[in-house]
């Protein structure tokens, strides 16, 4: 999918620097999130507090969106047979607008400064919209609309809706003009950004990578054909229910979406258990963790329709963002970064290389995996126990610093070419 197996020629693949700048920035924002917890987040109990909103975006934009956008730059030539026009300008531009915008956003939200909120919103919305339109225009032109392309298109449409809603809610804060529909629009922003943009993109990527990287059976045709359509239509129905205060409609669609995602989680786990390539590396642990956390998050969120406890909702959100999305993305980074390093080096004629697995090494990724699990547990703990602030801050910091170290280790050979000899044919 990312290289030779798919028939991707070297002149189509973007230079390594293009996706890598996004991949490496993600754990840097993870580190910032750890420091931010240490300094400013005594508790995660109040979901709508300014520090929790800020922290959420360090993870959702700083980590998740950063990697997902980088991955799209890498994958577009493969899945749609087209690369981004002007990718050498577009990638650094989107990357810097998003990074700069997120820093201003954090300052603006945490200090509740209107002008900073607006500046940040303009910078990030501009970055996201440029990304959405350039990707969509390439995907729509693809000759063969595969289930992955379909998932990407729906994911980008969801991101578009999420960004429009984000602009509205940010302007409401900046002008302190909070309308009665604010909460419904905020919930719709959360829905379209997490389930739509993040969830559907991950589903689309899974359709490609699970069979390819793990030599596992493909997802059922029926699921591949219809799942994202059902999710997207249900999200529209759910948002309609939210905005019109129609609880039955909201609940019906929420159950639909949850079932499709739970089905995805169970199907993925069963594919991985019965995979032909039985080698068990850290990325497999990440997949199992991610899928089980996805199912737990959805069940908790459904159960909360009965219990109606706001803390339970916060726990479900943490488990979805940190336990599901960040896990799968970190696991994929450990596959993709060594692969791309190897791919670009072999294409330049370097042959005497360490294997892809040795580029980072299992020991380092395993230690990081355990740190990730502890940081997830400590973030959940911070919803209930204020004393965990230091622990949570330190482990989130360490876990992300480790990811950064591992990614640098996995890619530095490309830049140093140390000990490599070029073969001349
Ligand atoms: C231009 C980009 C974005 C802007 C300006 C923005 C703005 C905001 C604002 C102002 C809030 C708080 C609203 C309130 O509580 O009244 C919020 C909440 C939230 N946003 Fe975004 N957002 C953006 C992108 C995203 C993305 C891409 C994601 C996910 C991938 C996301 C996920 C969330 C979540 C989960 C919350 C709830 C946080 C909480 O309640 O603590 N946002 N967003």
Image (cartoon, helix red, strand yellow):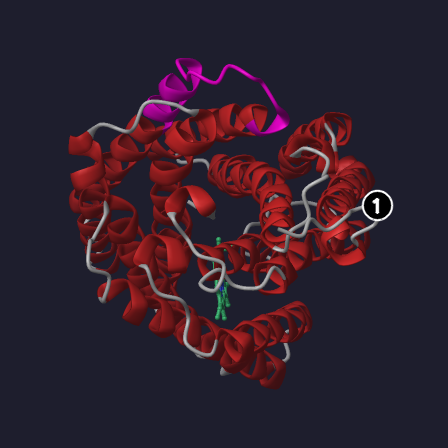
Check the image and report above or below for 376 versus 288: below
Magenta-drawn segment: 265-283
| Rendered residue at 68%/30% (across/down) | 369
Would you say residue 268 sits in the magenta stretch?
Answer: yes
Quick one: 320 or 313, which is closer to the camera? 320
Name of the residue lying farthest toward the front = 425
Side (left or right) of 95 relative to 229: right
Q: Name the residue nearer the viewer: 384 or 214.
A: 214
Q: Quadrant of the N terminus?
A: top left
Q: Is residue 270 visible?
A: yes
Which percent across, then down, holds residue 112? 63, 74
Circle 1 packing at 10 Å, graded few (<14), some (14-19), many (20+), is: few
In the displayed structure, 60 sits above or below 173; it is above
Q: Is residue 212 above or below residue 243?
A: above
Residue 309 is left or right of residue 396, and the answer is: left
What residue would you read off at disc 1?
Answer: 419
In the picture shown, does residue 341 fall above or below 308? below
Q: Is residue 178 visible?
A: no
Residue 75 placement (x, y as % from top left): 43, 54
Give the quarter of the image for residue 54.
bottom right
Find residue 71 and report its horizontal and vertical position in percent. Answer: 49, 54
Residue 52 among magenta residues: no
Left/right of residue 246 with respect to residue 173 in the rendered view: left
Please give the name of the residue rendered at 35% of the width and 65% of the height, measured from the top-left corner.
Answer: 82
Residues 215 and 194: in front is 215
Q: Position of residue 348 (x, y in %)?
A: 63, 56
Q: At numbered mark 1, what does the secondary structure look like: helix, strand or loop?
A: loop
| Total numbered labels placed on residues in the image | 1
């Amino acid at each position: 999918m990312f290289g030779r197996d798919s028939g991707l020629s070297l002149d189509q693949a973007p230079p390594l620097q293009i996706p890598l700048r996004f991949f490496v920035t993600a754990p840097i924002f993870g580190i910032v999130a750890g420091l931010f917890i240490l300094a400013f987040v005594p508790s995660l109990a109040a979901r709508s507090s300014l520090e929790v909103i800020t922290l959420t975006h360090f993870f959702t934009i700083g980590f998740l969106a950063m990697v997902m956008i980088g991955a799209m730059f890498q994958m577009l030539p493969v899945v749609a047979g087209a690369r981004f026009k002007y990718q050498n300008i577009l990638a650094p531009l989107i990357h810097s607008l998003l990074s700069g915008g997120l820093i201003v956003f954090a300052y603006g939200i945490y200090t509740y400064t209107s002008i900073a909120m607006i500046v940040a919103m303009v910078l990030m919305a501009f970055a996201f919209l440029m990304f959405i339109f350039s990707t969509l225009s390439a995907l729509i032109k693809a000759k063969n609309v595969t289930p992955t392309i379909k998932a990407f298109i729906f994911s980008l449409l969801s991101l578009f809706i999420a960004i429009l809603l984000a602009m509205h809610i940010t302007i409401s804060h900046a002008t302190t003009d909070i309308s009665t529909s604010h909460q419904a629009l905020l919930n719709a922003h959360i829905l379209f950004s997490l389930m739509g943009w993040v969830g559907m993109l991950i589903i689309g990527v899974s359709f490609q990578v699970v069979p390819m990287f793990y030599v596992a059976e493909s997802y059922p045709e029926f699921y591949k054909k219809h799942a994202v359509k059902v999710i997207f239509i249900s999200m529209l129905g759910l948002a309609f229910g939210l905005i019109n205060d129609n609880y039955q409609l909201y609940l019906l669609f929420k159950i639909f979406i949850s079932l499709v995602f739970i089905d995805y989680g169970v199907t993925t786990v069963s594919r991985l258990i019965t995979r032909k390539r039985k080698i068990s590396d850290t990325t497999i642990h990440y997949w199992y963790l991610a899928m089980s956390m996805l199912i737990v998050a959805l069940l908790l969120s459904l159960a909360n329709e009965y219990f109606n406890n706001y803390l339970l909702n916060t726990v479900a959100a943490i488990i979805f963002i940190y336990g599901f999305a960040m896990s799968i993305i970190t696991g994929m980074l450990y596959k993709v970064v060594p692969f791309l390093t190897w791919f670009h080096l072999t294409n330049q004629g370097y042959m005497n290389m360490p294997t892809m697995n040795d580029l980072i090494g299992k020991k380092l990724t395993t230690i990081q995996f355990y740190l990730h699990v502890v940081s997830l547990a400590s973030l959940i703990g911070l919803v209930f126990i204020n004393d965990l602030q230091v622990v949570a801050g330190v482990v989130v910091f360490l876990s992300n610093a480790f990811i950064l170290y591992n990614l640098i280790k996995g890619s530095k050979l490309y830049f140093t070419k140390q000990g490599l000899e070029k073969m001349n044919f």
